[in-house]
Amino acid sequence: MSELPTTNDPRQGYPSASSMDRIAACPGSHQLITSLRSSSGGGMERARVQDEKGNIWTRRGTDIHAAFRELLLGQVPTYDSKVVEPARELVREVRTVVQVASSIFPIGAWHGEGSLLDAVGEEWMLTMETRLWATTPAGNRFSGQYDLALTNETRGLAVILDAKTGWANVEPAPSNLQLRTLLSLAHHAFGCTDALVAILQPAVAAPSQARYQPEDIEPALASIDAIVDGAYAGGALNPSLGACKYCPAKLHCDQLTLIHLMHSLRHIPADHAKALEQCELADLVSAEVRAEAKRQLAYDPASVPGWELRVSHRRAVPNTQAAYDALVNERGMSAQQFHACCKLGIGKAESTLASLLNLKVPEAKRALAAKLGDQLILTASEPSLVPINAAETDATPTTSD
């Protein structure tokens, strides 16, 4: 295997756990990305890092992961409540999974207080936010970063958890390639032959879990090796929504240009499902074109003739109580008039209830609905055209795998 170029990316240009779904769907994407990184002199990677650092959802996810780590170590969180509460929800999910693990492995129960490592027992090692590598005599092969892993080398056991802070639907644990890649790395690094793996995504659903017993390990490892082999073999480019959404090479893919997509549309007018998928792909390309133009204009305001970056502003009142004190008086509004101008933030109310009553997000939703009764109504928007099983809300992933 030839050495691939090193970049500022901790993945160093090699396949990683977070990219396995893309590579499985579009084997040629890895070699395309590798060649672009090599020819751009690091510019492609700098653009990716700049976008991630500037993305509000990425920053939120990274902060939640940091607070999550503090809580797991029994430390006092150093972040504000908007970050700590989602982190506590993840901790509650960890407690649930560890409880399941304690019923099948010799591992101590953890009640969500104090250090997780102190609770599980001396045979277990705790790994968090750590990248492991699968290597060959020729060098690195692929890598993955654990959000949280508990490993017992003496017995060949592992509990592997991947924490998601967004709302986008992800593949369930039994078929999740990111988790399977992390399992493969645990096998190579710690001799793991029996594992419980789980996706933690409290904003969406209860933990999704799967167990890989000794007879399941080899087929799982073989499936990941086959995907990685396909990446290095330079397979076909196979555009799809799943493969292209987070692919950094969208603008450079011969199969994903606007001209190519429009040509495809002309030849499939009767196949509305296929045509709509092509439209979604065209939207991805358009968004990437705009993002690239914004990056260039941020670096050089004269780089895109006829275009500029323009900031818009909206008026906002961050402190509702201060506004009430200023407006509600004998020469101003009545309390009733003031409240008629306000709108209750449903998500904020649910988060507040979850914190006050120590509830998980689904429980907080039900509690709020019960307390508000018929004051909580559903309003319908104009119908949107979306693929079946699409996530209702999406967000950019964090910087970790």
Image (cartoon, rainbow, N blue to C red):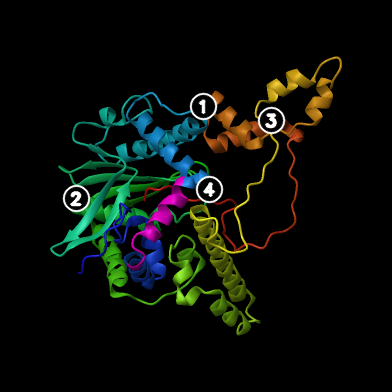
Q: Nearer the viewer, mark 1 or mark 3?
A: 3
- Residue at the spot of label 2: 189
Q: How many angstroms separate mark 3 from mark 4 (CA)?
A: 27 Å
Position of 62 relative to 116 (above/below): below
Secondary structure mostly seen in magenta is helix
User: Which of these two is toward me, 45 or 57?
Assistant: 45
Amino acid under disc 2: Ala
Q: Nearer the viewer, mark 2 or mark 3?
A: 3
Segment colored magenta: 39-53
Q: Secondary structure at mark 1?
A: loop
Residue 383 horizontal/vertical position (percent): 72, 58
Query: Of label 4 and label 1, which has the lower sequence position?
Result: 4
Amino acid under disc 1: Asn
Q: Nearer the viewer, mark 4 or mark 1?
A: 4
The label shown at residue 167 is: 4
Residue 130 horizontal/vertical position (percent): 28, 44
Residue 211 among those drawn in magenta = no
The label shown at residue 358 is: 1
Q: Residues within 10 Å of mark 2 (few under 14, many from 20)?
A: some
